[in-house]
Image (cartoon, rainbow, N blue to C red):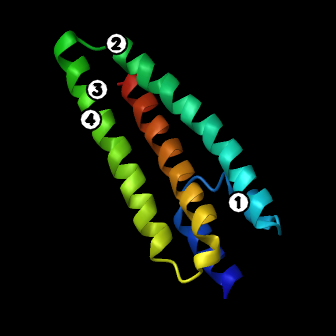
Amino acid sequence: MKKLLLLAIASTLSAGVWADCFSIDSSTDKRECLQKKLVIADKQLLSAYQENLGTTTPETKQQLIKAQRLWVQYKEADCFYEANRMDDRTGFASNQLACLLDKSISRAKELRERLNN
C-alpha cells in the first residue's frame, strides 16, 4: 500500500525530481534527501523571483512582492493539507517535503517564463 501511494504521488507531480529520494529505505535519510533538494529548489526560486523584481516597474514590483508572499502562504498550507490527507501518517514529513519541492520548482519555472515574455 505504501509503495502504491508513493507511486500515485510521483505520477501526479510534474517535476519528479525527488523520485530518487523515495527509493531510500530510511525515513530519516529520505527526509534529508528531500530537504537538500528543497534547499536547492528554493534558491532557484529566489533567483527567479529576484530577477523578476529587477525587471518590473515600481508599481508592478509591489504587486509581485504581494503575490509572492501570498503564494508562499498557499504553498505551505496546501502541502500541509496534501500530506495530512494521505493514509500513510508515517510518511507525512516526506510527503510534505515532496509537495513543497514540486511547488517551488513549478513556481521558479513560472517566474522564469515571465522573464521571457
Q: In the image, residue 57 lies at what x, y percent?
A: 22, 11
User: Residue drawn at (25%, 18%), measured in percent from left and top?
Assistant: 61
| Structural distance between the alpha carbons of marks 1 and 2 | 34 Å
Q: Earlier in the sequence, mark 2 or mark 3?
A: 2
Instruction: Decide if residue 116 is in sight here.
Output: no
Q: In this view, does 12 lie to the left or right of 94?
A: left
Closer to the eye: label 2 or 4 = 4
Q: Residues within 10 Å of mark 3 (few under 14, many from 20)?
A: some
The answer to whether the residue labelled 4 contacts the one labelled 3, judged by CB atoms less than 8 Å apart, is: yes
**Quarter of the rendering occupied by the C terminus:** top left
Q: Mark 2 points at which residue?
A: 55
User: Residue drawn at (63%, 71%), measured in percent from left and top?
Assistant: 91
The three-letter code of the residue at mark 4 reads Ala
Q: Name the residue under label 4.
A: 67
| Structural distance between the alpha carbons of marks 1 and 4 | 29 Å
Q: Mark 1 points at which residue?
A: 19
